[in-house]
Structure formats: C-alpha cells, structure tokens
Amino acid sequence: MKYKVDEDGIAWITLDRVDRLNAFDEESWKELGDKVRTANNDRKVKVVVLTGEGRAFSAGDDIFAMAELKDADDAKKFFNTLYYAVESLIELEKPLICAVNGLAYGGGCEILLFCDVVVGSKESKFSIPEAKLGLIPPMAISVGHKYWGKAVNRLAITGKPLLLRKLNK
C-alpha cells in the first residue's frame, strides 16, 4: 500500500495488490488502518484520498487468504484487524474521498460507506456479492442504512452490481 502526502496537504493512500484486484488480506487491513491513522494525526494533511491501482478499487476481502484461516482464533484475529481499519475510517477527522476505478466489490464497496465523497470512473462497478456466497456483508448491514439508507439493501441482498455508466444515462 502506497502512502504519500503532496504539497497541497492531500494524503494519497493507494491500494496496490494489483494481482489480487486490491483485495484485503489481514496485513492489508492492518496497513489501511495504520495509514489512515497516520494521515489523521498529521497536521499537514487536509484531506485523504483513497484509491486503487490497476483495474480495481478493491475486490473486498481476499477469499484465498481467508481460506487459509485455520480456526476460530485465526478468524477472530482477521476480523479484529478488519475492525481496526474500519475504526480508523470512522474516527478520521479529515474529509475522505474515494476515487473508484473499476471494481468496488464486497468490502471494497463497503469502505465507501465511510467516505465523504465517492468519485467513480465510467468503468466503475459497485457490488456486495456476499449474499451470492451465503455470507453476510458486515459493514453494509451494520452501518449501511445510516449512510446509504434503504439503497444498501439492493446491494446487500441481490449481489447485483451497479454500473456508473447506466446511472449516467
């Protein structure tokens, strides 16, 4: 994950696990939490921009990394680390802009719940496909209604993607 602060006081956090469509493993969630906290504590930073490198903002959780969790203790550690990152987004005192290029799926889409502004390219696709896997999207069902209202239900229940180019027509 890349982090830089430019001369205008913009902290750029770039997800760069391109080979995994910027999907989050435990280390990535920890790093996101650390980077957001660093930006929050830096007096020079005025705004934070979160984006993804390559053809995706983020595909959410890295399913392959999750499959390697051995037991309940591993799963608890993973989700506590995810919570650490989410908590950093909730507690961020500076504006958060998410620049979405390509896919924002699962946890990658749910991160957008915590943004002040979401900007998407014409190729952006938003989806919370957990329902198709028989899973629960934790952020969407816990805080989704607060930020997106009932609109989050369509994403959380159907798993069907929203396409920006269809929204623009």
Image (cartoon, rainbow, N blue to C red):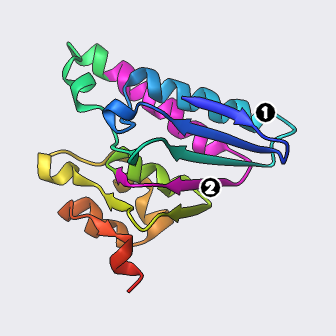
First-in-chain label (1 vs 2): 1
Q: Which of the pair 124/76 is nearer the observer?
A: 124
The number of numbered badges drawn on the structure is: 2
Residue at 52 percent of width and 34 percent of height: 85
**Residue type at mark 2?**
Ile
Residue at 28 percent of width and 64 percent of height: 155
Residue at 38 percent of width and 79 percent of height: 167
**Residue type at mark 1?**
Asn
Quadrant including the C terminus = bottom left
Task: State the image coordinates of residue 140 (x, y, percent, origin top left).
Answer: 37, 55
Residue at 47 percent of width and 49 percent of height: 111
Mark 2 secondary-structure assignment:
strand
Which circle marks residue 138 in the picture?
none
Residue 94 inside the magenta-drawn segment = yes
Crowding at mark 1 (Cα within 10 Å: few <14, some 14-19, many 20+): few
With respect to residue 50, does 77 lie above or below?
Answer: above
Write down the region rendered in magenta: 76-104
Left or right side of 31 for 35? right
Q: Where is mark 1, residue-wise?
A: 41
Closer mark to the observer between disc 1 and disc 2: 2
Crowding at mark 2 (Cα within 10 Å: few <14, some 14-19, many 20+): some
Q: Which of the pair 137/67 is nearer the observer?
A: 67
Which circle marks residue 97 in the picture?
2
Q: Are marks 1 and 2 in contact (CB under 8 Å)?
A: no
Left or right side of 56 for 117? right
